[in-house]
Image: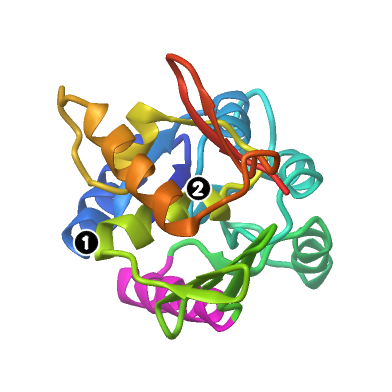
């Protein structure tokens, strides 16, 4: 699971990044609001940890802008603001949760797990005739069940989850293969060819489109 941490206090960033990576999460950081929003709009994350008071753009501004594009990715505010009105304002902007500084790291981890479990309950993803049941780990195309390998399933899930967004080969190799060093991304094309063949998609229905030299994009 990939987490974006938008926080300008270096000590908190170092502590949280180290702790969350030890928990098995992949953590990307941004030290200001402008960079945080750019990352959110151009890359794919499973959860966002967002400070309220940030240079360049506030967490509230980021949350509002991001929610115009993405309705489902969980956002947890990390902030010293704790009045009822401020809490309401954050939730109305689109945040899913709110944890007051200073906070227990163990509590934060448990809250993150809860939001990931909640995401899993929304277990059916659709792309045209393709249906992905995340709980049962089943893929069907034109109502026919398709037998995918684990890696094929994860790759298809990643692309459909990011429907409408360009997924570069570098992002895919990092997020699906969890490889963060120079690696031949041509392996992705091999898997994509196998997935397309198994799904038996009609040529006139371009649900999974190759962007030459860049990566892939899925659209209904």
Where residue 200 sits: x, y (%)?
51, 54
Residue positioned 62% across, 40% down in the render:
203
* Residue 100: quarter of image: bottom right
Disc 1 crowd, CA 10 A, few/some/many (<14, 14-19, 20+): few
For image coordinates 33% across by 28% down, the residue present is: 170
Judge whether residue 11 can be spotted in this image. Answer: no
| Magenta-drawn stretch contains 109 | yes
Residue 2, compared with residue 8, is above or below; it is below
Q: Nearer the viewer, mark 2 or mark 1?
A: 2
Q: Is residue 78 left or right of residue 196?
A: right
Residue segment shown in magenta: 103-121
Up-down relation of residue 112 to residue 41 (above or below): below
Query: Alpha-carbon neighbours of circle 2 within 10 Å: few (<14), some, or many (≥20)?
Result: many
Q: Position of residue 16 (x, y in %)?
A: 31, 53
Q: Which residue is mark 1?
A: 24
Q: Residue furthest top?
A: 213
The answer to whether residue 41 is visible is yes
The one nearer the camera, 50 or 205, is 205
Residue situated in front as seen by the camera: 200 or 121: 200
Name the side, left or right, on which 107 lies relative to 41: left
Relative to 145, say whether 209 is above or below: above
């Amino acid at each position: 699971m990939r987490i974006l941490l938008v926080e300008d206090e270096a000590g908190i960033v170092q502590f949280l990044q180290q702790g969350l990576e030890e928990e098995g999460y992949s953590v990307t950081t941004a030290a200001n609001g402008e960079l945080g929003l750019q990352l959110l709009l151009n890359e794919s994350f499973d959860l966002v940890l967002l400070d309220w008071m940030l240079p360049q753009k506030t967490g509230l501004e980021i949350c509002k802008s991001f929610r115009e594009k993405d309705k489902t990715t969980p956002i947890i505010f990390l902030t010293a603001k704790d009045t009822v009105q401020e809490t309401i304002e954050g939730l109305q902007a689109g945040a899913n949760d709110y944890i007051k500084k200073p906070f227990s790291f163990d509590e934060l981890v448990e809250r993150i797990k809860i939001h990931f479990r909640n995401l899993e309950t929304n277990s059916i993803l659709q792309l045209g005739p393709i249906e992905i049941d995340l709980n049962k780990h089943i893929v069907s195309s034109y109502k026919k069940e398709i037998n995918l390998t684990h890696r094929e399933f994860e790759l298809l899930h990643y692309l459909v989850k990011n429907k409408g967004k360009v997924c570069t080969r570098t992002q895919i190799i990092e997020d699906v293969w969890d490889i963060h060093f120079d690696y031949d991304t041509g392996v992705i094309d091999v898997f994509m060819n196998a997935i397309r063949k198994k799904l038996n998609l009609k040529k006139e229905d371009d649900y999974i489109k190759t962007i030459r030299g860049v990566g892939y994009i899925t659209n209904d």
